Each structure stands twice: as structure tokens, then as C-alpha cells.
Image (cartoon, helix red, strand yellow):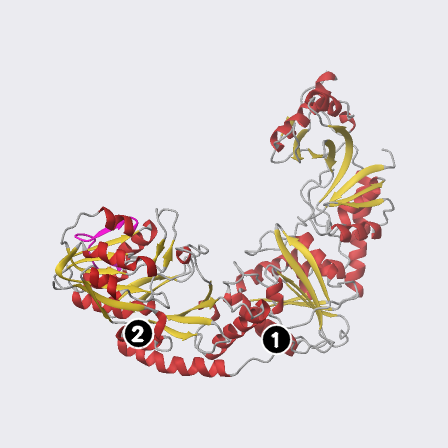
Amino acid sequence: MTSALQLFATCAKGLEPLLFDELKALGLEDVQQTLAGCRFSSDLEGAYRVCLWSRLASRVLLQLGQCPVTNDLAAVSAAIAETSWQQHMTAEHTLIVDFTGQNHDIRHTQFGAQVVKDGIVDHFRHAGLGRPNVDKADPDIRINAHLQRDQLTWYIDLSGEALHRRGYRLEQGLAPLRETLAAAIAIRAGVTPNTEVIVDPFCGSGTLLIEAAMIMLDHAPGLRRQHWGFSRWLQHDASLWQGLMNEAENRHEHAKSSTQPRFYGSDSDPRILTVADQNAQRLGFAEFFQWQAQDATKVTAPALGSAENSSLVLCNPPYGERLGEEVETLLLYRRFGQQLRQAFQGWQIGLLAGDEALLKRLKLRSHKKYKLFNGALDVILALYDLSEEQVEFTKEQSSGLANRFKKNYQKLEKWAAKEGLTSWRLYDADLPEYNAAVDVYNEHLVIQEYAAPKDIPPAVAKERLWYLLDTLASTLPFSAANMHLKVRQKQAGKQQYQRQHLRGITTVVHEYGADFKINLSDYLDTGLFLDHRWARKTIGELSEGKVVLNLFAYTCSASVHAALGGARAVTSVDLSKTYLAWGEDNFRLNGLPLQPHSFVQADCVQWLQKQPPQQRFDLIFLDPPTFSNSKRMQDVLDIQRDHVQLLKLAARLLKDDGVIIFSNNKRRFKLDKEALAAAFLTAEDWTQRSISQDFARHKGIHHLFKVTQSVE
């Protein structure tokens, strides 16, 4: 072998500078940092040393050749065939080709791999030898080919399996960190052989602690690996490799005998701690570790002894499925920040988070931040020095919010129980600076954030929202896991009905003898408009023996009340197939047969226009949106402009003594009585009587009218 092998160590995006430093520390001189890795030249011993000792590299690739890729792919195969393949493998060896990149001529990696494989096969065929076979499961030789800017480079992969597979982690948690990323976090956080104590309150299967332990105990990350890409390579020097292995083993044993680091891992899941302990045992580290099932917000610092200047909290708390909706995660960070401040004074902290907003919930000042990538996910490693004074850097919030929550809850809970309600509004921007609505659904809270006024900076509005969430969790008997945050802004058309993020968190609420399925997570609204409950109750009371029409039926809650009230038949019309199916579920939930009732998927305006004048319905419930421009509607609906026309269309289907109950939620709605009178319709304002106690603070929440046909 030549002493100047050309090599490329690949790594995850964001780790290139650390890998460069690591390769230099391993004694390599000619190192060049590039995208997704570092190029370097070395002898075989240097290549082996990188395989064995790199904590950050994903693969170590030995370059064999290069050629341009133009429209002559036969020339590419010929260039590959000219490589001295017989120096590296025999015709009896099996192989696999990993191909990355594309250009105008090679657009698919599978096709690119075929071009490379054909070149290798041609080499052996031209030499009068057999044809190497492909083995995807356990190849003797792994070839790596990369196409970039019309330049193809091919390599032998000396590592085989990716280097993050250290051999100690046979089982892992739900959201594991790749070992190379965990090592990078430990290095960035300042872990060295002189570090003495590390605590991980979210340890999972222990990867962060174990990678830190490898650094502190001078354990080569490849020391326990069983399989290498160079094992069946013809140029492999087994004696040289064994010498490096012996050296690594000796270094580790010396470190174990000369230092006594301590590692404390805790997690809320006892089962995963068993996995973590087994991982540590496979490396012979068990004597240095203590594991405990514990809530991270209750973890306290172990006694330090002489380790006052070398103690570190290193952790990767959960990020939450979707920032802005995961109240539990946001509150967890807030409480964890409080615990760090109280229990870990004097410590260094390294914390990996999925978003800057989560870090802000800690209420701690970092002195360093690094952008990293956990797979395809952008993450931030923040470092904190709790030996420095950590002053609360947010403005003190009003204590009146907690008092308001307590007062409202005590009053309205009793009222709701007396009324037979398990869903009700607790708070609706009672204090203007805390601009949100809070609704109770059994043991759940739904928090709907309103759009802040334009003169309120977004950061201020967001801080007020977090304080509201904090106060709810600390004041009322609702767990953070049952608090669901939604952002409600001025909507266009039926935007408020659009699915948010499929999670399927549901509950069943009770209302005046009826049960309704509530979806707490997947839509901006939950399936039940709480402010319309009086109207629904009244519809039930008026429906006995009647034929009822429910327009813009949504999830058919008014239809359920009508059917339970003894209606002979209820027709529910809505544009959404999803919500009509939900309505059918609500009928089943209440033990109501689907026949003789009907569920019609249609644009309500178009449906009314197509109906011939016929006195068919005794009672019509008309509850249109304020504004709608659904793609499936031919026209734009504006309730202020169009309400008279809607009522006239509905009245064509109304019996002479029939009633239309007309409702809408436009705050400044004004009924056009003169136009209604011209259409021989009379409206009685039922708005005030329809406002329930939990909405009494905002009497303009909706408008409700009883509309009948005038006597000529």
C-alpha cells in the first residue's frame, strides 16, 4: 500500500468543524473540511485510527478513482473498470454499491449504482475472471459512489456499518439520539477526561451519558464493534489493526483505574432505565452509573465532594410534537428551568432543544448556542453557567390572572354542575392583556389564543400567553397533559374548520341530556360551539312531533337535541362530509337511529336554491358562518349582506306556522328588519336570553332571532 491514501470521513450536517478538530487531534496533518465531512490523506494506520477513535464520523471512505459524468455513460463504466479492483477484492467477493447524488445523465441513485457495478463487473470479465455477486444483507466489500457537479468519485467503505453503531445499544427509546450526535453534544458542552459528575434528567436509554463516559474513560467508540468494512478487504493488515485495538484497550483500562467519574441518569419511564443499565453494562461502565425513575422537574443535584468545578447537567428534553400546541412540553421546560435554578446552582448545563421558544421557557441566560441537526430536524444546543448569577429576565406579570381563574372556576363549576353541563367557558379575555379563551371539556382545558393587537409586539404577546398557561397549570386542577393550545386569528371562510394536526385526542361531554364527541386536538374548533347551547336546548324543546331542518349543521349537535326532543325527522345539511360523519357518530352516541333522519352533503345556499317551494319543515335552524369562500361554494357568503336572502330561501320551505331560529356570530351584526318585513317575515330578538352565564362577560358573542312568517 502507498503511504498516502486519499480518504474522506463523512459526518452529519453541522458536525464538520468538530470532525476537523477531532481528525487533527488524532494526529492527521492534511485535513480539509468540506460539506458533510472532511478529506484527509494518511497511511493505513491513520485510516484505522480514525475508524477506531472517531466519535463524530459516520463513515471512513478510501478513494479509488474519479471521472467526469457526461452523456457518455459507457466512458464512466470504462473508467471504473480501469480501477485496480483485484488489489481490493476477488471475483468471489460479494459487494454492494451505495450511490448518492444526481445530474442530468444519472437521475436516480439505483441507476447510478448499476453504472458503478457494471464497471466493476467489466473489470473482472475483461481479466477473464468470474463475476462478483451483489449481497445487500452482508457484503464482503461495500463500495460508496458520490456524484457532485458532474464529477463521480468512488470509494471502498472501510467502516462497513455506519460508525454510530458502537455495539452497545441493542435497544433504545422512542426518540433516540444518534450516538455521533450525542458525542458532539458532549464535546460542545465541554466534557473532557477531567469532568467528574454528569447528570441527565431525561436520560432515556442513556446515550448522552454513555457517550460522555466514553470520553471521560478514554474508551475508543469502535472498541466493541464486531464488524468492519475492511475485514474482508484484500489490503487489510490484521496485525496493524490488532496493535491499535490493544493500545485502545490499555488506554481505557488505565483511565478506569485512575479516575472515578459519576453518572446519574433519571427518566420517568422505569422500563427504559433497564435498557440504559444494560447498555452501560455492555461497555463495562455499570459501576460508574446510577439510575433512578423520577420526574425531571424534581431531580436534585448529587453531593459533589471535590467535583465543584467539573459538574455538568447534560440532557435532551422532549421537543413536543408541534410547537405552539404542546402545552405539556412548554410547561415542562418552564418547570425544569425553575428546578435547574433552585437545585443546580454552580453547575454547567448543556441542553438540546428543538426550538428557541422552548429554550426561552427555561428563563435562563445561555452563554453559548450551537445549531445542530437531529436527523432532518433543526435543533439547538444551549450552554448555561449556573455558577454565574441568573436573574429572571422577564417582566413580572400580574397576580390578578390567578385570582380571576380561581374566582371564575369556583363560580362556574357549580353553575355548570347544576345545569347538567360538563363543557363550559372558564375565561374569555377577562383581562385584556391576556387575550385568550379557556374552555373546560370534562378534565381537559382548551386554550384558544386570539390574535394580539397590532401595537403589541409579538414577543410580549407570546410571553403573556406562556404566563397564562403557567398560571392555569399552577392554579386549577388540570394536568398539563390535558391542556390543549390553539391559535385563533381572524379567519377567512371556513379556515376555522380545517384540520390542524392529526392526534385524535377526544372526550365525550354532556349537555342538557345529550352527549357529544369532542375532538380536542385535530381541528381549530372542537365540534361543539358552547355559546349556542341555549339555542340547541330550545330547539329540543320545540321539536316534539316536528319535521326539522338544520342548515350549516356542522357536527349536527342541534340535530341531536331535536331528535332527542321527539322530532319526527331531522334533515342535516353541511358542505363537509367529515362533519356529517361526525354528526352520525353523535346520533349513535345518544342511541338515536339514523333513519328516518337524513344527512345531506351540500352547499347550504345552493341546496336551498335548488329546493322547490314546498311547506315541508316545522322548524328550521339556520346558523351560517360570518363569512365563507370555500372552494366548493360557487359564491362568497357574507352574512351581513346575505342574511335576508338566506332567510327568504329558508322560508320557502317553512310551514305557515313554522319557526326559523336564526343565529350568527358576527359581532356587529345588524338585522335588516325592513327587508324582512318586505318579505313578510318577522323577527324576534332572542339574543339576550340565549347568553349563558359563562358567556355573560361578552354579550356580543352571538345573535339569535326567532323568525316567523307575517300574517298578511
Measured as percent of width and height from the top left, residue 312 is found at: 71, 69
- Mark closer to the chain start, 1 or 2: 1
Measured as percent of width and height from the top left, residue 119 is found at: 70, 23
Q: Quick one: label 1, few (<14), some, or many (20+) residues within 10 Å?
A: some
Q: What amino acid is found at the position of numbered circle 1 in the picture?
A: Gln
Between 701 and 175, the one nearer to me in the picture: 701
Instruction: Identify which residue is drawn at 78% across, 30% down.
Output: 65
**Residue ID for mark 1:** 339
**Residue ID for mark 2:** 691
Q: What amino acid is found at the position of numbered circle 2 in the picture?
A: Ile
Residue 703 as seen in the image, left or right of residue 122:
left
Residue 368 as seen in the image, left or right of residue 697:
right
- In the image, which is nearer the foreground, mark 1 or mark 2? 2
Instruction: Identify which residue is drawn at 64% across, 79% down.
Output: 342
Can the viewer see residue 284? Answer: no
Task: Count all numbered tags in the image, as a single digit.
Answer: 2
Asked where in the image residue 703 lies, by quadrant, the reply is bottom left
Q: Secondary structure at mark 2?
A: loop
The stretch of residues the image draws in magenta is: 587-603
Q: Is residue 471 above or below residue 326?
A: below
Measured as percent of width and height from the top left, residue 487 is found at: 47, 63
Specify the quadrant that holds the N terminus.
top right
Between 346 and 322, the one nearer to me in the picture: 322
Reply yes or no: does residue 600 show up in magenta.
yes
